[in-house]
Image (tube, rainbow, N blue to C red):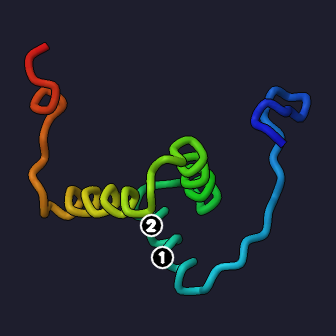
Amino acid sequence: MSETDTNGGGEPETTSINVRLTETFLDDIDATWRELGYNSRSEFVREALRDAVRHPDLTRESWKEIAAVEHARRTGESETFSREDVLGDE
């Protein structure tokens, strides 16, 4: 089913799937989605899957680096730059 399939009300149809995870991994997922401010576990997992589909060229190492930088930023372990700092004078 694709995102273009609809249920007649203009909303994309959805299908439930079952995934088996360890309790420890599920605990990590739950802590992460709450910490990041998602409304639900499903919303978080859908976005993670979209990222994986939209960016298949990113390796596991790339995702780990992104996660490490995000963690450092959130915990204050890295310097924060403004958009202007990054883009400079345009």
Packing grade of label 2 (10 A; few <14, some 14-19, many >=20) is some
Q: Is residue 67 above or below residue 87?
A: below
Which residue corresponds to the image point at 53% horizontal and 86% vertical from the top-left?
24
Q: Work out whether residue 18 or residue 56 is closer to the camera in this orientation and state it.
A: 56
> In this orientation, which residue lies closer to the viewer: 31 or 54?
54
Q: Residue at point 91% right, 29% down? A: 8
Residue sitting farthest toward the top: 90
| Residue at 86%, 28% in the rendered image | 9
Residue 69 position, x and y percent, is: 25, 57
Query: What residue is shown at x 71% (from left), y 78% (from top)?
Result: 20
Disc assigned to residue 11 = none
Q: Amino acid at mark 2?
A: Thr
Q: Residues within 10 Å of mark 1 (few under 14, many from 20)?
A: few
Query: Where the N terminus falls, by quadrant?
Result: top right
In this picture, is 86 found above or below 24? above
Image quarter (top left, top right, bottom left or bottom right) of the C terminus: top left
Q: Is residue 39 left or right of residue 73?
A: right
Q: Nearer the viewer, residue 18 or 53?
A: 53
Task: Answer with the quarter of the image where residue 25 lies.
Answer: bottom right
Residues under numbered marks 2 and 1 in contact, where contact means CB atoms less than 8 Å apart: yes
Q: Which residue is mark 2?
A: 32
Report the label total.
2
Q: Which residue is mark 1?
A: 28
Q: Position of residue 43 (x, y in %)?
A: 60, 53
**Callout 1 amino acid:** Asp
Give the image location of residue 35, x and y in percent.
40, 63
Q: Secondary structure at mark 2?
A: helix
Quadrant in which residue 70 is drawn: bottom left
Between the C-alphas of marks 2 and 1, the distance is: 6 Å
> To which quarter of the image does residue 48 belong?
bottom right
Q: Secondary structure at mark 1?
A: helix
Residue in front for this viewpoint, 83 or 7: 83
